[in-house]
Amino acid sequence: MRNLIRLNKEINLSIMPKGWKGGKENQISCLTLYMTKEEREKIMLKFSLYRNKAYRVEIMCYLLSNYIAHICGKPCESIAMKVWKYGKEYNTPNKYVYYSIGAIPVDLKNAVALNMSKSGYRFRNEIYYHAVTAFYNAPDRLLDRMCKRIAYMKNPKAKYDRAVRLQTVIPEEIYQMINSYAIQNGMNVCDLIRITLRASCVSKKERALDDSMIGKVFSLYRLIKQPAYPFTANPNNRALLVEIKGEREMYYLMKLMKRRRISNAEMLRKAIRALDDVISHKDKIKRNVTIEPQSYDENEEDYWYDKIAKNDFARSIYL
């Protein structure tokens, strides 16, 4: 097992709780875990999936430092404690392998060693294993929040575009059908789904004022009545990611999903099935839905012209 001491060039100490310091020489030390080969492969894969959001060293430092701060009665991040609850108890395997997490600050390793009696663990490897398994077992929504928090702590002045991400796996034939319909109308698949959700999730007042074809076809009932279970597994299925931006669209969409207890993937599946239903029965729906043009009423126009003339006459007298 290697235990190297070198300058801290990999870890950003701003992710640590208030009061932590990098030491006089800002030194770091290598952190190594003992686990089975299967566990190491699974955890390596999970860390690689979040590589673009946060480094594994930053995740480990964030979880460990906040846990030590929690047991010492210092201020800590609530999202770190929510992720920490998903950790597993360490069982010494018969055949274990080394897994190097990376370099963490020496002060953090010393803090873990000094607070072993408060933590309830016997060995430091148990705490490290708990942090790694907590990251592996935590749901994606908590991990995304944690990674966003780490990114914000590293660079508070950076601007991040808010968006609601909907992702699921759909059959290839349904995708091609929706894609061809979207191209015919000068859009892509994501734009068509955004318009569908916007027309279905807006308020009743805005829905009543919407005279467009999509506004009349895609009602809230047509969207909600669709099943939310996953599509049948098929090697030809493809992943679809849709981002909903805009404060009003995000507000109404999140409000609907929270009230109906629908997840992001389930909402996207409902929208896909609603589009599939509408496109498949396009001719029948066209016969039932008609858009009437605004009628030209001469009497109404004469009334407004007469009212304007009276106002002009009154204004000419009093001015």
Image (cartoon, helix red, strand yellow):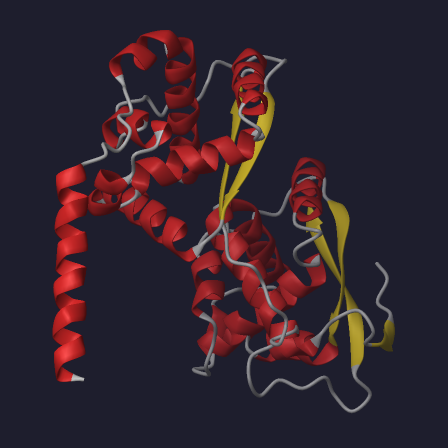
249, 139: nearer the viewer:
249
29, 126: nearer the viewer:
29
261, 19: nearer the viewer:
261
Q: Position of residue 236 (x, y in %)?
A: 63, 13
Residue under the point 60% across and 64% down = 123
Q: Quadrant of residue 215?
A: top left
Residue under the point 53% across and 53% down = 143
User: Is residue 43 among what the camera can see?
Assistant: yes
Q: Relative to residue 2, is residue 19 drawn left or right?
A: left
User: Is residue 138 among what the camera can see?
Assistant: no
Q: Which of the image's four quarters has the N terminus?
A: bottom right
The single residue placed furthest to the bottom in the displayed view is 24
Q: Which of the image's four quarters has the C terminus?
A: bottom left
- The answer to whether residue 175 is above or below residue 124 is above
Q: Relative to residue 193, is residue 286 drawn left or right?
A: left
Q: Quadrant of residue 308?
A: bottom left
Q: Relative to residue 82, is residue 309 drawn left or right?
A: left
Q: Position of residue 288 (x, y in %)?
A: 25, 13
- The answer to whether residue 74 is above or below residue 169 is below
Q: Position of residue 156 (x, y in %)?
A: 60, 76
Total marks shown come to 0
31, 220: nearer the viewer:
220
- The answer to whether residue 114 is above or below residue 225 is below
Residue under the point 56% across and 11% down = 173
Q: Position of residue 125 (x, y in %)?
A: 64, 60
